[in-house]
Image: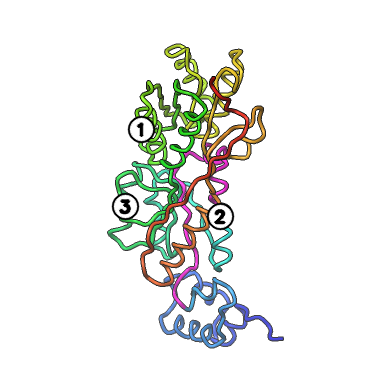
Amino acid sequence: MKKPVTISRIAKEAGVSVSTVSRVLNNKPDVLDETRERVLQVIDTYHFQANAYAKGIVQKKSHTIAMVIAHDVEYVFMNQYFTEVMRGVITETQRRGYFVLSLYCKSILEAMSAFQQQRVDGILLISPTAEHQEAAEHFAKNDVPVVSVGAFPNFDTLPCVKLDDYEGASAAMEYLLSRGHRRIAYIGGPGKVPSTEARNRAYLNKMREYGCPVTSGMFQKSDGMIASSDMVDRILRDTPDITAIFAGSDYVAIGVINALQSRGLRVPEDISVVGFDDVPMSSQIVPKVTTVRQDGDRKGALAASMLIDWIETGEMPESATIKTELVIRDSVCEVL
């Protein structure tokens, strides 16, 4: 059995110190071109490709992608969706022999610095918003491999993995309508987010299709459970005869259920509730939430695979759309 090639062996064969090899590995500028070439030739000779780090040396790539999440950190770690997406990304990158550099930054342009310094070969954006569009356009102009999990509001130059939010929300609304509900309110998340806008649009279109009055609200707070409680007060005040609430996320739905129950209303006997996402908590509360399932792990893994394919082949991938699934549980009853 052959012994694994080590940095010490590379240094010995190249006639340099271990620290010099380390500087070459890290693309430090303070190495003579002749010395750098000699070290790289030794690496190539030994086919030092068993791990991504060494492979990157020969190919002058880092075999690392940046996973950029330009959102409030507290919100990210409170939301199970982000956990699922990140898990999918990490699982796929490990399978493909890549590393992940996680960047939690206010501006995704910070990721460009990492790319220019050759610390990463490509960038994966998680849930971009309209605020990130200028940076995305900058990436596109500079031929930076970038794939996003979620679509940009008005920018489709870069490939993305997106959910068919409109179809999922339409299915949720169709289910409520099929159960006899006609006075349905909608509570959505922050505006200027494509997924939120698609779910809101599906609600509006279904209500108009059935000739039903519209009662909807949007909030800008990051904590959906708290914000939804305020929206429930407004909805009950303005439209006390509603029979159902469609929530734009499960966290909003859970907040709605808590708010209704604290006001002495029963779910679903008095007011039915439907959520979106199918986070674990949605099946752990009473009543269990009827919701629309999206596979965050799959979205993350597919986006990572698309980005790595782009890095390795030089060909930009096509965007991909993932379907949803309606999960019927206990939070909806029929209106007689």
Q: Could you tell me which secondary element the residue under label 1 belongs to?
A: helix
Find the distance from the CA under tag 2 to the CA under tag 1: 33 Å
> What span is in magenta?
59-86
Q: Reading the chain from its start, which is encountered first: label 2 or label 1? A: 2
Residue 177 vertical position relative to residue 5 in the rendered view, above or below:
above
Residue 123 x/y as whole percent: 43, 58
Q: Amino acid at mark 3?
A: Asp
Q: Is residue 69 within the magenta segment?
A: yes
Residue 5 x/y as whole percent: 62, 81
Q: Reading the chain from its start, which is encountered first: label 2 or label 3? A: 2
Q: Amino acid at mark 1?
A: Asn
Pointer 3 residue: 156
Residue 309 vertical position relative to residue 188 in the rendered view, above or below:
below
Q: Residue at x 47, y 57 (%)?
A: 303
Taking the view exactly as shown, the residue that stands out farthest to the front is 336
Q: Residue at x 55, y 61 (%)?
A: 92
Pointer 2 residue: 88
Q: Could you tell me which secondary element the residue under label 2 belongs to?
A: helix
Mark 1 nearby-residue class (10 Å; few <14, some 14–19, many ≥20): some
Find the distance from the CA under tag 3 to the CA under tag 1: 24 Å
Mark 2 nearby-residue class (10 Å; few <14, some 14–19, many ≥20): many
Residue 82 x/y as whole percent: 53, 45
Find the distance from the CA under tag 2 to the CA under tag 3: 23 Å
Q: Reading the chain from its start, which is encountered first: label 3 or label 1? A: 3
Q: Amino acid at mark 2?
A: Gly
Residue 38 vertical position relative to residue 312 in the rendered view, above or below:
below
Q: Nearer the viewer, mark 2 or mark 1?
A: 1
Q: Residue at x 43, y 50 (%)?
A: 162
Taking the view exactly as shown, the residue that stands out farthest to the right is 1
Pointer 1 residue: 205
Which one is nearer the viewer's eye here, 228 or 165?
A: 165
